Amino acid sequence: MGILEDKDNARLFYRYFSRVYDTINPYIWDDRMRNQALEWFDADPDDRVLDVGAGTGFATEGLLNHVDEVYALDQSRGQFEQAFRKFGKHGKVHFHMGDAERLPFKDDTFDKLWSSGSIEYWPDPVAALREFRRVTKPGGTVLVVGPDYPKLTPFQKLADAIMLFYDAEEAEAMFRDAGFEEMRHFIQQRHRGTPRAITTVATVPAADATAAAETTAATEEPAASDD
């Protein structure tokens, strides 16, 4: 586990990094990449959308070009202080302090769920993805953007020491473990030589199908040996 996958470390880090986040972020995740992801997200104006790990509101700004209001959740007060300056505390953005692994919302609350630049800090990403599935209506879209795993060994060792980096195969496994059945993975990059992002767009399965699959997995016994 990387140092920033510890929640206390991540909160401390963002207490200070939040002050320069909006200056640095465009070099990694820029408007063009965000807008491409928004096309895949395909939200309607009246969709109820949750932005998990909303931070200073970079993705939230883009979402507001497509939907009437956004529910924004983050665990960093420092990040939200920057977002308050953009949107105010009361208006089209509804702010919630909270944890991705324990979302403070009822089942099937949202039509769609977006999370960019957050998964890399989760100690248990599968638990968070299960929460995403829980609070999003069946048939709804869940979009998650995270850092693609580096190709060179020195960068891999550095990445592993800091936070979660993963490739498309690992993304597929995490989403399936969380109960998703249909998903697509896209690689995004600002330009050649810059960090790559992996964007997964998944559909929340019908509740009865998911429950049946989980019941089967829980009750299924291994086949008897011929020995």
Image (tube, rainbow, N blue to C red):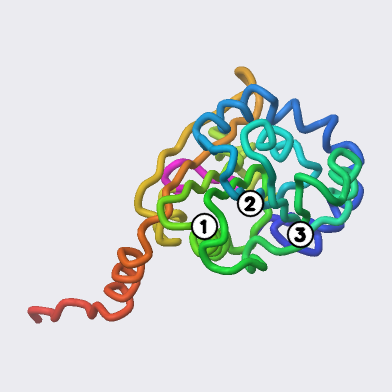
Residue hosting label 3 = 96
Residue 50, labelled with which disc?
2
Residue 109 in view: yes
**Residue at 49% from the left image edge and 59% from the top image edge:** 133
Query: Relative to residue 12, is residue 169 drawn left or right?
Result: left
In the displayed structure, 41 sits above or below 8; it is above
Image quarter where the N terminus lies is bottom right
- Please report whichever mark, 1 or 2, sits nearer to the chain's N-terminal start: 2
Query: In x, y percent, where is residue 193?
Result: 63, 21
Badge 2 amino acid: Leu
Image quarter where the C terminus lies is bottom left
Query: In x, y percent, where is residue 194?
Result: 66, 24
Q: Which residues are magenta?
A: 164-171
Query: Relative to residue 161, is residue 182 drawn left or right?
Result: left
**Residue at 29% from the left image edge and 70% from the top image edge:** 212
Residue 136, labelled with which disc?
1
In the displayed orientation, state which residue is furthest to the top.
Answer: 192
What secondary structure is found at the residue carrying circle 1? Answer: strand
Mark 1–mark 2 CB contact (< 8 Å): yes
**Residue at 78% from the left image edge and 55% from the top image edge:** 95
Query: In front here: 212 or 108?
Result: 108
What secondary structure is found at the residue carrying circle 3? Answer: strand
Residue 190 magenta-drawn? no
In the displayed orientation, state which residue is furthest to the left.
Answer: 226
What secondary structure is found at the residue carrying circle 2? Answer: strand
- Please report whichever mark, 3 or 2, sits nearer to the chain's N-terminal start: 2
Residue at mark 3 to residue at mark 2: CA–CA distance? 10 Å
Crowd around label 2: few <14 · some 14–19 · many ≥20 (10 Å): many
